[in-house]
């Protein structure tokens, strides 16, 4: 077959994929009232898709672009992990070094078997006490939890009290812990005698030409293109949606675990480096051996999309993504959420971020990866399937003779029902048993055959007309 015909066919398939991706993005943004979102896709060392949707600032009608700076939250951890591995390359530290070698503080003095690798993999056994989150909560006007945190001494003392809360051996229990990455940032500063911001810029951001990326409010607000987000938090009800738009969160304690603001265009430079075995524009940023260590599984993690996700060093690794290895991480700052995923052996990378707290980025990121694998995400991506099912059954119902009510609602990608019976009013999450037949069971401590909910469709219109639960039939209003 003529080479030009083959190339045209490939381009046509790719364009069809991007058209479908755009439909998915727009559908989700409409449904969850997302102000703005940006995405970048890399394949074979080339940017194949970059696009912004909606607004980076609603009030001023400023569009979101692939160059808009967005807080990527915990994806920042992978940058911090890379810096630690670069220190290892310089023989300044080892991953198996005890943390108390660098930080002579509790809980590490009394637990010297906790190592740098344990901090990087959330496997230290130290439960989270969210010291780094308080300054952010105050930014959002959340004063529910107030504890002394006005100084570094306060911060370290707060963490020190976990010495009596450690009931698992290092490597035994996964406790996702942002503060451990804050401490890694402190170790980086101590060993380099530079600020975390300066080390990050010198060692990663500048070499990767991520010149606008920053962990500094001052630099963000002086962005030469004035292209950065206003962040939004959903409030109110679905019927009367409201947004809070607090100041974007910045904190010294947040920088290493989640403080980086960058664009999806710049994130493709990061993807290019990682997919090219640590090399960017013929400059080696990190050794191949170090990249292997970053992506070596350390502990089973609950954060993933397949059956057996593992946490590595600042990354999640899954081997069962349609027979491919998926390396990924997500992030959330309250006013922004994000997803970054790589399929290394196929040289594919995706970066997505939004300027609110809806959490649709992982759905979109996975959908983009599935489309790059020439798979239909609407048939495979379970969260998309849940939304499709919800759209069929959502609404209000009344039982025979109008005695009782049943309502179907969506909460954080989980379908719930609020149902009235002669025993009272109950709220249950629904567990899907059969997508096609719209059959569910109630989430309950003690399962029972009585706790089944089934929705029935009109044979002609395929619209849901009634539901059954226990002894009742509820007509859709």
Image (spheres, grey):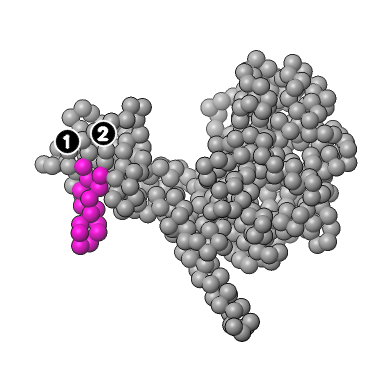
- Residue receiving disc 1: 471
Q: Dot 1: few (<14), some (14–19), or many (≥20) neighbours within 10 Å?
A: few
* 3 versus 227 height, above or below: below
Q: Does the magenta portion include 466?
A: yes
Q: Nearer the viewer, residue 10 or 55?
A: 10
Q: Is residue 382 magenta?
A: no
Part of the protein shown in magenta = 454-468
Can residue 109 be seen from the camera position used here? Answer: yes
User: Left of 423 or right of it: where is 307?
Assistant: right
- The one of 466 and 211 positioned closer to us in this rendering: 466
Judge depth for marks 1 and 2 and give the one in front: 2
Q: Position of residue 146 (x, y in %)?
A: 59, 24
Quarter assignment of residue 115: top right
What residue appears at the point 71 percent right and 51 percent down from the top-left corner? Answer: 220
Q: Main secondary structure of the magenta part?
A: strand
Q: Nearer the viewer, residue 72 or 356?
A: 72
Residue at the extreme bottom of the image, as rendered = 2
Spatial CA span between label 1 and label 2: 12 Å
Q: Quadrant of the N terminus?
A: bottom right
Q: Secondary structure at mark 1?
A: loop
Residue 257 is situated, as x and y percent measured from the top left of the image, at 68, 38
Q: Is residue 346 left or right of residue 450?
A: right
Q: Is residue 216 visible?
A: no
The residue sitting at 62% across, 61% down in the picture is 41
Q: Which residue, given by chain and number where applicable, does mark 2 sit on?
A: 449
Q: Residue at x 88, y 38 (%)?
A: 91
* In the image: residue 294, left or right of residue 418: right
Q: In percent of the image, x 67 and y 57: which residue is there?
A: 345
């Amino acid at each position: 077959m003529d080479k030009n015909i083959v190339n045209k066919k490939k381009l046509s398939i790719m364009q069809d994929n991007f058209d479908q991706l755009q439909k998915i993005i727009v559908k989700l943004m409409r449904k969850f009232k997302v102000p703005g979102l940006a995405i970048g896709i890399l394949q074979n060392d080339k940017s194949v898709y970059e696009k912004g949707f909606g607004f980076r600032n609603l009030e001023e009608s400023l569009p979101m672009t692939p160059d808009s700076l967005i807080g990527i939250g915990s994806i920042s951890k992978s940058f911090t992990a890379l810096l630690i591995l670069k220190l290892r390359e310089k023989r300044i530290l080892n991953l198996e070094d005890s943390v108390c070698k660098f930080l002579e503080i509790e809980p590490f003095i009394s637990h010297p078997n906790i190592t740098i690798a344990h901090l990087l993999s959330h496997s230290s056994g130290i439960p989270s006490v969210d010291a780094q989150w308080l300054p952010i909560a105050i930014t959002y006007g959340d004063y529910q939890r107030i504890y002394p945190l006005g100084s570094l001494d306060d911060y370290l003392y707060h963490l020190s009290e976990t010495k009596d809360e450690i009931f698992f051996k290092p490597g035994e229990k996964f406790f996702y812990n942002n503060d451990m990455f804050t401490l890694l940032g402190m170790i980086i500063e101590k060993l380099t005698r530079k600020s975390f911001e300066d080390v990050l810029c010198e060692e990663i951001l500048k070499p990767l030409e991520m010149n606008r990326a920053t962990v500094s409010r001052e630099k963000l607000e002086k962005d030469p293109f004035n292209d950065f987000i206003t962040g939004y938090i959903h409030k109110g009800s679905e019927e009367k949606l409201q947004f809070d738009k607090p100041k974007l969160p910045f904190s010294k304690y947040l920088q290493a675990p989640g403080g980086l603001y960058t664009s999806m265009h710049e994130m493709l430079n990061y993807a290019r480096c990682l997919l090219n075995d640590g090399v960017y524009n013929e400059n080696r940023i990190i050794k191949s051996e170090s990249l292997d260590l970053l992506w070596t599984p350390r502990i089973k993690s609950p954060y993933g999309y397949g059956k057996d996700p593992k946490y590595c060093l600042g990354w999640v690794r899954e081997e069962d993504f349609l027979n491919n290895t998926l390396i990924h991480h997500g992030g959330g700052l309250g006013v922004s959420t994000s997803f970054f995923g790589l399929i290394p052996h196929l040289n594919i990378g995706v970066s997505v971020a939004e300027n609110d707290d809806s959490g649709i980025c992982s759905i979109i990121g996975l959908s983009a990866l599935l489309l790059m694998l020439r798979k239909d995400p609407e048939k495979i991506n379970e969260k998309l399937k849940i939304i499709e099912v919800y759209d069929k059954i959502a609404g209000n119902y009344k039982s025979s003779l109008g005695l009782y009510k049943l309502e179907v609602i969506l909460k954080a990608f989980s379908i719930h029902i609020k149902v009235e019976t002669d025993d009272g009013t109950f709220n249950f999450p629904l567990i899907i048993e059969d997508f096609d037949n719209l059959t569910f069971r109630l989430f309950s401590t003690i399962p029972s055959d009585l706790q089944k909910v089934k929705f029935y469709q009109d044979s002609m219109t395929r619209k849901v007309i009634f539901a059954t639960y226990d002894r009742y039939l509820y007509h859709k209003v």
